[in-house]
Image (cartoon, grey):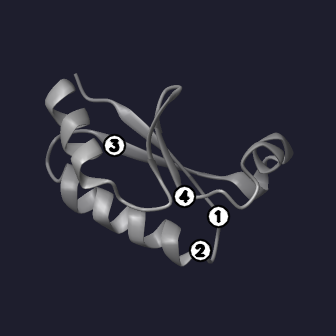
Amino acid sequence: MAKTLTLYTRQDCPLCDELAEGLHAVLGTSGHAVAPVDVDADPSLKAKYGWDVPLLFDGGAEICRHELDLPAIQEWLRANP
């Protein structure tokens, strides 16, 4: 079953862009999607995460922080084919 991962990000963030690009390449044709969420657009998210982006989550479970963690993504894909 395809899932949608949440990518907490902000505009003009090179690390965010790099993680998003790498993630799209790794997910490829898996059917899984990524929903970017701009933390600056939501005061509660901005307060919670501050400058601590990018962050990739599956629901409440964090997968990556600040950069693409390839082993973590591959493990997630094995658990979520």
Quick check: 2 left or right of 54? Answer: left
* Amino acid found under the numbered disc labelled 4: Pro
- Please state which amino acid type lies under the numbered disc 1: Arg
Sequence order check: which comes first, mark 4 or mark 3?
A: 3
Q: Earlier in the sequence, mark 3 or mark 2?
A: 2
Q: Is residue 3 left or right of residue 8?
A: left
**Percent position of residue 10, x then y:** 64, 64
At a point 25% along the width and 29% down the height, the residue shown is 2
Numbered circle sitting on residue 62 = none
For residue 60, above or below residue 68: above
Between label 4 and label 3, give the one nearer the viewer.
4
- Disc 3 marks a residue whose amino acid type is Ala
Residue 63 location in percent, x, y? 41, 40
Contact, mark 2 vs mark 1 (Cβ under 8 Å): yes
Which residue in the protein does label 4 denote?
Answer: 54
Q: Looking at this view, is 57 or 1 the one in front? A: 57
Q: Residues within 10 Å of mark 3 (few under 14, many from 20)?
A: some
Coordinates of residue 36 in the picture (x, y in percent): 52, 52
Q: Which residue is mark 1?
A: 10
Q: Amino acid at mark 2?
A: Cys
Viewer-side label of 3, 2: 2
Q: Does label 2 or label 4 sit earlier along the sequence?
A: 2
Residue beneath the point at 77% across and 42% down: 48
The one nearer the camera, 20 or 64, is 64
Taking the spot 53% from the left edge, 26% from the top edge, the residue there is: 60
Q: What label sits on residue 33 in the rendered view?
A: 3
Of helix, strand and loop, which one carries label 1? Answer: loop
Residue 13 circle label = 2
